Every structure is written in C-alpha cells, then in structure tokens.
Amino acid sequence: IAGITQAPTSQILAAGRRMTLRCTQDMRHNAMYWYRQDLGLGLRLIHYSNTAGTTGKGEVPDGYSVSRANTDDFPLTLASAVPSQTSVYFCASSEGSAYNEQFFGPGTRLTVL
Amino acid sequence: GQNIDQPTEMTATEGAIVQINCTYQTSGFNGLFWYQQHAGEAPTFLSYNVLDGLEEKGRFSSFLSRSKGYSYLLLKELQMKDSASYLCAVITDDYKLSFGAGTTVTVRA
C-alpha cells in the first residue's frame, strides 16, 4: 500500500441497506477525515479523527458513523442508506491538525437507489 | 455557516495566465489552502497561505489578504494538463477545513 486507499471504488446500493466504506493509510498520519463531494457544493466534511481512539462530527454528520480503532483505518458506515447520500466520498489524512496538507484517497462513488 | 466563493468556470488559452479568485467569510481564519482536482480524481495539494502576501511555487502562485478576506491562485504559462478544478479551502476557528465549490478551468489550444 502506498498512501491512502479506499474501497470499494464504486457501489450501487438499495435504500435502507447498511454500507461501510473502507479507508486505509500507511503514512502513520494522526488525523483522518471523511468528505462527500456533490456537484456545485464542493467537499463537505462528514466526520474526522484527530488521533486513534477519538472522532468528531463535521458539517454533515447525520446518517453516518465512524470509528478509529487504530492509526491506519477509518471506516465510514451508513446505517440505513437514503438516496440523498448518493455522492462521491473521499477519505483524507494529514500528519497533524488541519494546518497540515491533507492527502486524499481516490474516492468511492456511491449510488443509493 | 461558512461562505467561500469562487467563480464556477474559467477558460483560457494555452500559454496564457489565469487568476482564480476566492473570497471568504468564515467563523475564524487559521489559513487557506488551494487544491487541484482533475476530473474523476482525488484533490491534490497546491499551496498554503497563512500570512498576507504572495507565495510562489513554479508556475503557480497564491496570494492572501486576511483583512480583505481574499485570496487568488495564479496559474502562469498554462498547459493543457492544467485543465482541472481548483478548490479554495479555509481553516476555520474549529480547526476544520471548509471548502469552496471549486473553479473549473478549461485550457484551450
């Protein structure tokens, strides 16, 4: 692994289903983030984690949950998907706080029908 | 909420210069980033400004005026590969990154 990876690359999901988007980084970065990107709205922060064992809410956290059991992994879970969660999801990491450059994963394109 | 404004689209000719403006009204200010995002790809870091003035990095430069809530990204000697979206992002007072909607730059031959 080099950098930050996400899985799956894309997914079509029925409304009401549970889905976990995976994110793994091998840079030993303390901070990790989940964003969604929608046309005309830019990137919006869903949840973040400043260090393993801690998480926080971003701008649009409703309907999503995260966990940070270790430094490398930061999964995002949709407990019961709804069509408005159709989006491209980006995971990112940075060495420390928001002052540092964020490195983004390749993204997951999610469609909820 | 945070208010970060950028033009939606810009078009320029190969070899020319383009300036992408970003104005912000946010709850606090702790720095400003510019990212580049090619279609279908992840954003990648271009620049970071926290003090007033111009930061130059090769063909790209970024300017910040904190008193005016204003930044611009200057792309010189445009190349076809510079066709992309350019995202302005502000670190707000809760130390999170808030993004503008992005400016799509199209470079024509």
Image (cartoon, rainbow, N blue to C red):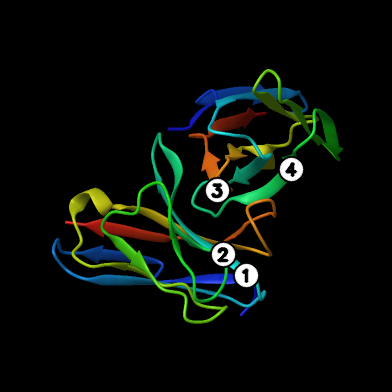
Mark 4 or mark 3: whose residue is earlier in sequence: 4
C-alpha separation, residue under disc 2 versus residue under disc 3: 11 Å
Residue to which mark 2 is pinned: A50
C-alpha separation, residue under disc 1 versus residue under disc 2: 6 Å
Q: Chain of mark 2?
A: A
- What residue do we see at 79% from left, 34% from top? B51
Nearer the viewer's eye, disc 4 or disc 1? 1
Mark 1 or mark 2: whose residue is earlier in sequence: 1
Q: Chain of mark 4?
A: B
Foreground of the two, A72 or A55: A55
> Mark 1 Cα within 10 Å, few/some/many (few <14, many 20+)?
some
Question: Do the residues marked 4 and 1 share a common chain?
Answer: no
Name which residue type carries label 2: Asn
> Mark 3 Cα within 10 Å, few/some/many (few <14, many 20+)?
some
- What residue do we see at 73% from left, 42% from top? B48
Name which residue type carries label 3: Lys
C-alpha separation, residue under disc 4 versus residue under disc 3: 17 Å
Say the numbered circle drawn on residue B47.
4
Name which residue type carries label 1: Asn
Foreground of the two, A66 or A39: A66
The image position of residue B19, as x and y in percent, is 70, 23
- What residue do we see at 48% from left, 60% from top? A48
Image quadrant holding the N terminus of chain B, namely top left
The image position of residue A16, as x and y in percent, is 13, 64
- Is the residue under label 1 in contact with that under label 3 (CB below 8 Å)? no
Residue to which mark 1 is pinned: A30
Q: Chain of mark 3?
A: B
The image position of residue B76, as x and y in percent, is 79, 29
C-alpha separation, residue under disc 2 versus residue under disc 4: 22 Å
Say the numbered circle drawn on residue B96.
3
